[in-house]
Structures are given as C-alpha cells and as structure tokens.
Image: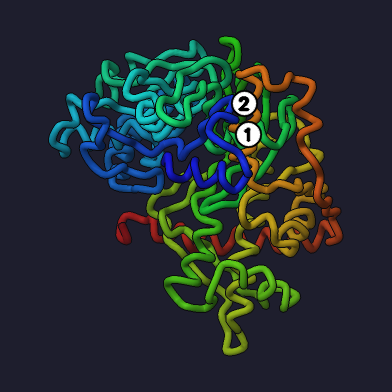
C-alpha cells in the first residue's frame, strides 16, 4: 500500500511532504477480519461477489424477515452484503470472534494509522445489513437477526472531515472515506437531487442522488447512504449489477476470444449489432432489479453465422441492457424521469457502449474527461475535508469529455430491450428448485 502511494507520488513529481490530505475509497461489502495488535488479517477477505451465504439469505427470506431488513437498512437479503459473511466467518474462522471487523476502508485506516483508529464512514456502514440508515447508527435488531456482535465493529464517522492520520513517511490527515460507488457519485459531481451516474467496472452500479429524501424502493433498488457530511446523511437509490466488465474478462481469460480488454471496444464496433445474440452474464446470479442468486449465465440466439465479434458485442450490449432495467426501476420509484446519465469506469471509454446506452435510455449520456471518478471522488471528499477547496469548487472540477445523444428510434430501443428480457427469463429458469 505504501509502495503504491510512493509510486503515485513519483509519477506526479511530488514528494511525501506535498501530501495535504488522504482520501480512501474501497470495495464496500467485502469483509476483512484482522488482529488488533499485529494488524494482520486472520483470514482471507470475503469479497462482495462471494455467494457462499445464499442459502442463509434464502432461509431468512422464507422466515419473513426481508421487509423489516429493508425498512431498517434499505437493502435486500442477499449474500452480496456483509452481515451474512460475518456470521459465516464467526462460525468457521479461527480467531474471528476476537478480531477487529470492518470493510476494506476500516482496515486501510488501521494500517495507515498504526492501529490507533477503528472507523468506517456512513456510506460503507450502510452496505453491511447492520446499519440503521434512518438513525445513522449500528442496529442492535439487525445484529441479533444475523447473530453477530456489534462490539467489534468500527466507529462510524463522516465521509469528509477530520477522520484519522497516517503515520510514517507519508504523514498526513485522512479526511475522506467513501465506498467506491458513492465516491464515484461524488466524483461525478452528482450532488443535486435527481442526478445519476453509472460506473462500468467488474460490475456496474447506477446511483441516483436523492438528497435528504430516503426513497423506499418497490422495484428492486437499494436505498443507501450516499455520504455523511457534518453529521448530516445524504441518500441515494442504487441498482447493483453484478457482472458487466467481468463478462469481457471471461471472454478473454475463460474462452480466449479476445487477447486483452482493450480489444473489446473496436471488435464490438466492427459489427452493426450482435446479430440476434444475447448474453446474460449471470455468472454469480443476478443483482438489481431481480436479486436472484440462482440465475446462471446464458447465451441465446447463436447461429452458424455467429462470430467472436458478435459475442463480444453481445457482452457490451448486456451492460447497456442491464443499465436500462435499473434506470427504469429508479424512475418508477422516484416518479421522475432521468434527464442525463453520467458514466465512468474502465468500459466507459468505449464509444460503442456509450452510444448504445444513450439509444436505449433515450437521454444524453455524458462522459467526463477523467473516467476514474471513484478515485476522483475520494480526492474531492478529502480535499473538502482538509479545506483544500470549498463546495463551490466541486462543479468546476468536473470536466466533460463527450456527450452522446440518442440516435435510435424508441420502437427499436424498446424492441431490443424486450428481447433482452426474454433472455433474462431463460437465465432465471435455472433458479427453479429442480435446478438449484
């Protein structure tokens, strides 16, 4: 970690003494357990994509607990979140009961600060299934439901402001923490109610800022904390799509169809469409709006004329189809249409994806100059927390690279989306009891 920081400073032509503040962003639901004295992990991290607790979630759902879980935490009963991972670790990992518990941000702060502080910010806490997002505190009721203790959980702090301090050569205050998707929302300057972004990474995550309104979803969205500043919570609706860029990784590493991720955009653009092929990348089940942990990846529409370009195109198109499903659910929940979508992440550099996204949604898609807005958001939060800049500077720090306007007719876009949903139903057929 420190080596990476030093290399970043070298690349920027800076020295450790130039660091004014440190911002942290991280995979949110990933569980880390570590020894408080040595700061060493007591077991491998259990990452957000891990599905080992799917059956436990199903039992809790069948017992009728999901409505109460949603009311308190804004989340659904799914192995994606941290609580069931922690319950599993307490039962199966030696030393877990005495270990410090946290998401990756908590462990990074502990390492940077030499173990002096055990903290997390409200955005990360809201992803655990253990946080009351209305009251802004850990929930004893949820801890009892999941059979975990709150005693080893971190103290919840603001996402921006004085949090801790790094020791060692890079000695600077830690003044910003946010989960990766909330950091991207902030980095996209989506601070006004109704603004939204999508980050195309391993998975894709659409977040719509709802300000002080805690919007309860009836469409499979998550209600989450966007950030906490000066003790006040801001909220967002989120659609978590588990696999988007990871499908391209599968085509590269699993099938050898492409040699590198950079080939995907040009290859997808080399054909006008996927020739009727639809790839549903439900490799770890489906996230929003379906929340089906038993769905499995499906490819439909193959013919003898299907080429590797069509398969790659289908994987790229799946990113846009899944995003439209989520955006339509958000619009249903909020009762307001989205007027633009800001995009970021590695796959956002593909013009073919951004254009298709605009076509399917029927609204402009806006790509910033800096598509790694997750890191940018952490820097924005840290800079605000340290007084490097003020609130008025935020909008000016976001710069437009290109805007993609819709070019496809609504009938054509709706027809493609309808066929996509037929493919999704084929994928979900594997969730039937006989196929589990």
Residue 354 x/y as whole percent: 74, 57
* Residue 381 circle label: 2
User: Viewer-proximal residue, 41 or 205?
Assistant: 41
Q: Is residue 82 left or right of residue 281?
A: left
Q: Secondary structure at mark 2?
A: helix
Q: Is residue 334 left or right of residue 102?
A: right
Quadrant in which residue 380 is drawn: top right
Quadrant where the N terminus is found in the figure: top left
Residue 201 x/y as whole percent: 56, 52
**Residue 364 position (above or below residue 114):** below
**Residue 251 position (above or below residue 68):** below
Q: Cβ–Cβ below 8 Å for labels 1 and 2?
A: yes
Residue 129, visible in the rendered structure: no
Q: Is residue 32 left or right of residue 357?
A: left
Quadrant in which residue 113 is drawn: top left
User: Viewer-proximal residue, 109 or 311?
Assistant: 109
Residue 425, visible in the rendered structure: yes
User: Residue at position x 60%, y 40% from top?
Assistant: 374
User: Residue at position x 65%, y 75% from top?
Assistant: 276
User: Residue at position x 18%, y 26% from top?
Assistant: 97
Q: Residue furthest bottom?
A: 304
| Disc 2 crowd, CA 10 A, few/some/many (<14, 14-19, 20+) | many
**Residue 115 position (above or below residue 137):** below
**Residue wearing tag 1:** 377
């Amino acid at each position: 970690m420190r080596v990476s920081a030093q290399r970043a400073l070298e690349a920027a032509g800076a020295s450790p003494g130039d660091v004014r503040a440190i911002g942290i962003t991280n995979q949110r639901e990933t569980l880390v357990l570590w020894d408080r004295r040595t700061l060493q992990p007591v077991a491998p991290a259990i990452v957000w994509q891990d599905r080992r607790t799917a059956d436990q979630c199903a039992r809790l759902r069948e017992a009728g607990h999901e409505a109460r879980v949603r009311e308190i935490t804004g989340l659904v009963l799914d192995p994606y979140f941290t609580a069931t991972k922690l319950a599993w670790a307490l039962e199966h990992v030696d030393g877990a009961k005495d270990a410090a518990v946290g998401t990756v941000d908590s462990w990074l702060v502990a390492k940077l600060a030499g173990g002096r502080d055990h903290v997390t910010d409200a955005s990360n806490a809201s992803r655990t299934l253990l946080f009351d997002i209305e009251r802004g505190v850990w929930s004893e009721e949820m801890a009892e439901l999941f059979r975990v203790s709150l005693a080893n959980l971190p103290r919840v702090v603001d996402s921006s402001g004085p949090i801790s301090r790094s020791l060692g050569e890079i000695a600077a205050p830690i003044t910003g923490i946010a989960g990766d998707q909330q950091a991207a929302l902030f980095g996209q300057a989506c601070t006004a109610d109704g603004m939204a972004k999508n980050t195309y990474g391993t998975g894709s995550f659409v977040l719509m800022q709802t300000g002080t309104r805690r919007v309860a979803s009836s469409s499979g969205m998550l209600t989450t904390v966007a950030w906490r500043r000066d003790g006040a919570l801001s909220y967002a609706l989120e659609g978590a799509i588990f696999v988007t860029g990871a499908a391209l990784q599968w085509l590269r590493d699993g099938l050898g169809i492409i040699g590198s991720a950079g080939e995907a955009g040009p290859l997808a653009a080399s054909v006008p469409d996927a020739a009727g092929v639809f790839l549903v990348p439900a490799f770890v089940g489906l996230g929003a709006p379906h929340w089906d942990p038993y769905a499995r990846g499906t490819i439909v529409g193959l013919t003898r004329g299907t080429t590797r370009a069509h398969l790659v195109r289908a994987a790229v198109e799946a990113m846009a189809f899944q995003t439209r499903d989520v955006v339509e659910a958000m619009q249903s929940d909020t009762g307001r249409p989205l007027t633009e979508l800001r995009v970021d992440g590695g796959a956002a550099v593909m013009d073919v994806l951004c254009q298709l996204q605009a076509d399917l949604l029927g609204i402009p898609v806006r790509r910033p100059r800096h598509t790694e807005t997750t890191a940018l958001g952490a820097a924005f939060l840290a800079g605000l927390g340290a007084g490097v800049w003020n609130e008025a500077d935020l909008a000016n720090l976001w710069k437009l690279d290109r805007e993609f306007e819709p070019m496809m007719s609504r009938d054509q876009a709706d027809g493609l989306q309808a066929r996509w949903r037929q493919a999704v139903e084929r994928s979900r057929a594997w969730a039937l009891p006989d196929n589990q």
